[in-house]
Image (spheres, grey):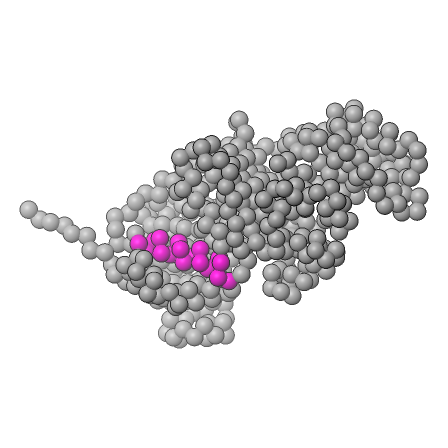
Amino acid sequence: MGVCQLIEKSIVNIGIIGLGVVGRGVLKILSDNKELILKRTGKEVVIKKAAARTEKTLLSTGLPKEMLTINPLEVVEDKDIDIVIELIGGYNPAKEFIEKALKNKKSVVTANKEVIAKSGYELLKIANENNVYLRFEASAVGGVPIIASLYRSLTSYDINRLVGIINGTTNYILTDMYESGTSFENSLKEAQRKGYAESDPTKDIEGYDAAYKVTILASLAFGARIDINDVYREGITNIDPIDIKYADELNYRIKLLAIASRKEDNIDVRVHPMLVPKSHLLANVEGVYNAVFTEGEGYGKLLFSGPGAGSLPAASMVVSDLVDIARLHGRPYIEDLSYNHFKNLSILNIENTINPYYLRIRVNDRPGVLALIANSFAVHKVSFASVIQKEAFQDEVDVVFLTHETEEYRIRGALSSIEKYPEIKGISAFIRVLKE
């Protein structure tokens, strides 16, 4: 009788595409923790080839010249490389490199939230078809291991709701505006000076980054196929320091939140600023820190929190995925069923969501204006929890309203009707409120 014995490979060769902030962090962790990784995996993880855009970047890493290239395809097509780490960001050519690596029978680790949000289902299918692994822990919440928790730890019961601060740049800006009382523009410049914001911060401040991330989290939490184009997105560029001040007086903080919740026949997935009660755990998440608050049957409420920006937090998640795959390398492939069974669920339209609201309306400072507003809102079945008259500006005054919970289409209808009155000078702020 012949005996077939499986011999595990003791060396795992890796290739890295992208040597920016996170890429350099990965190099540092692999260098500093070589013995620990060997102990955890039983394998020697060896960098076989590294690619970056410029020779200057490559030479600055200190890696031997023979393993450096400005052509990422050399990494993807190297027959000796077992695992490819993709860290260049953006959609293409990153998606093309990941797909080609998987089809070349190489497992892939990526931190690319845009690629996973837009094409994750397709790439996971390709990975399974080629008996290799695709891991993306660093794509969602920086240094917080939330993805592993969603598909491994929190699987005994359904997850009902996720609410999170998942963009470090915007959280830093809103924290700075709160603490210093300065404008959005000044806080953005400070974030850029400290390296927390890119020279072109659009993806962060307009909510794209958070939308990619919540798409990934909601897909895993609810087993849903989500089209990123169906996710409502709103950034923080219109947040005024005066609303941060008024929110503070009302015992709230303004945060950019990502929300995903399970409804009867659909799911609610969106990103936008919200007033968060100071008693809520998320209200106290400051600076570049991220946090995800989860609720589920059986386990109750959990908060995952950690740094959402910087080299080592994200790099540590990349290396954790690398270690996970290295452990499995050389063993029979295990089909990744946890990633490969998604249902088509519809996304709740933002106008049908239900929230309390914070409104700041500038009006003529004269008798009868509040009664006019109250009547219009009553017609649309919107009731007020509180009404506060604030600062006056010559013959105009700001009035702040907090409403009870209602469907968004009712609020929008009420605001549309009152804007027609000459006494209404403008809807200065319209911000949803998180109900604790």
Q: Is residue 315 left or right of residue 420?
A: left
Q: Is residue 102 left or right of residue 404?
A: left
Q: Can residue 227 be seen in the rendering of this structure?
A: no
Where is residue 328? Give x, y as percent: 30, 52
In the picture, measured across the screen, residue 162 lies left or right of residue 385, that is left
Position of residue 257 relative to residue 32, above or below, is above
- Residue depicted at 51% across the width and 34% down the height: 160
| Residue at 83% from the left image edge and 31% from the top image edge | 373
Q: Give the quarter of the figure containing the C terminus.
A: top right
Furthest toward the front, the residue is 279
Pick whichever, 110 or 434, lies toward us.
434
Q: How many numbered circles are shown?
A: 0
Using the image as rendered, state which of residue 384 and residue 136 is in the foreground.
384
Tell me if residue 432 comes above or below residue 17 in the rendering. above
- Give the quarter of the image for residue 232: top right
| Residue 356 spot, x, y in % from top left | 69, 34
The stretch drawn in magenta includes residue 319: yes
Q: Residue sitting at 81 percent across and 38 percent down?
A: 388
Quadrant in which residue 110 is drawn: bottom left
Q: Nearer the viewer, residue 164 or 277?
A: 277
Residue 362 picture location, percent across and down: 84, 41
Main SS type for the magenta part? helix
Q: Is residue 366 visible?
A: yes
The spot of residue 143 in percent (x, y) is 49, 54
Q: Eyeballing the image, is 39 above or below 378?
A: below
Is 335 in the magenta? Answer: no
* Residue at 75%, 51% in the rendered image: 241
262 displayed left or right of 194: left
Where does the magenta region start and end? Answer: 311-327
